[in-house]
Image (cartoon, rainbow, N blue to C red):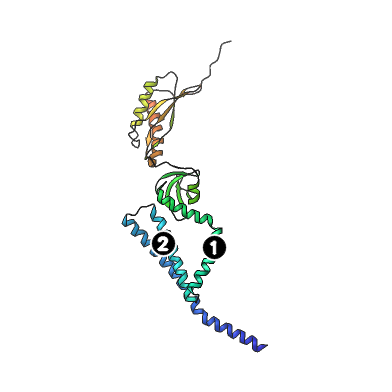
Amino acid sequence: MNFDLNSSINALLDNAIQWAPKLVSAILILIIGFWIVGMITRMIGKAFDRSGLDKDVQPFLKSLISVLLKILVVLSAASVVGIEITAFAALLAGAGLAIGAAMSGTLGHFASGVMILIFKPYRVGDLVDVQGQLGHVKEIQVFNTILTTLDHKKVIIPNGIATSGIMTNLSAEGKLRVDLNVAMPYEEDFDKVRGIIKGALDKVPQKMADEPTIEIEKFDENNILLAVRPYATPEQYWDVYFNSYREIKKAFGEANIPVAYPTRKIKNV
């Protein structure tokens, strides 16, 4: 009994001594290999920047190259341990079939990413509204689209979701209409007020040269509501929005136009 136990222990030690260098080598290959992959990916990214490659395609290709290189590193580590590449490939293929069914959605996101790059419903830098998320497109990756919202939050949207519903590209036409509303007292002359508002908008440097719309939108109980519609680039939308109100308020004060406020008439009994 002791002889058998000693023999088993000796056999385990022999196997450990035999496999230890291979395992250590495989681990080192993985660590160093992944580090080299990261360095190569960064170098490729810089090369893409210098080449002028479409900025929509750059993140997609970088992530795809990174995945392929990491697979090569794993295969190299497996061969050092002694696993035959053909057997390892067969194992991956078998596992791929099982995982593929569970990851059909992920594969769909990959296909959607390819379609986004081909048909370009949006590009890097565009201001978009995707599934209720409003922001600028930062990256189009293999499986996801990365948005930076107007309040500087990072939103990750799977490509399949981004292309499966209604998506609004606010940058597609190169300009946006800025919707403003200005209250005008009933006793004021509309043409006079219209001219004052137009002069105020002319002092907003970020406003586009397109003729703004200044018309009566509706009659409220206490004032006349005017629709004021200048135009701005997507990048300067909020600058035009806030500066227009600021200049209009200033112009109204200089023209002695009172702010409309609720009034109450008291009838004599």
Q: Residue at 53%, 60% (x, y): give it.
A: 100
- Place of residue 68 in the rendered image (x, y in percent of width and height, measured from the top left): 44, 64
Front position in the image: 120 or 33: 120
Mark 2 secondary-structure assignment? helix
70 in relation to 181, above or below: below
Say whether residue 144 is visible: no
For the question of whether residue 11 can be seen, the reply is: yes
Residue type at the position of mark 1: Leu
Outermost residue to the right: 1
The residue lying toward the viewer, choosing from 129 and 182, is: 129
Left or right: where 92 falls relative to 209 = right
Q: Which amino acid is tagged 2?
A: Ile
Q: Residue at x 55, y 59 (%)?
A: 101
Q: Which residue position holds label 1?
A: 97
- Badge 1, how many Cα within 10 Å: few under 14, some, many 20+? few
Work out whether mark 2 precedes mark 1 in sequence or the reverse, and give the earlier one.
2
* CA gap, disc 2 and disc 1: 22 Å
Task: Report x, y in % for residue 151.
Answer: 46, 45
Q: Nearer the viewer, mark 2 or mark 1?
A: 1
Q: Quadrant of residue 210?
A: top left
Element type where label 1 sits in the image: helix
Q: Which residue is mark 2?
A: 65
Name of the residue lying farthest toward the left = 51
**Is residue 241 or residue 268 the one in the foreground?**
241
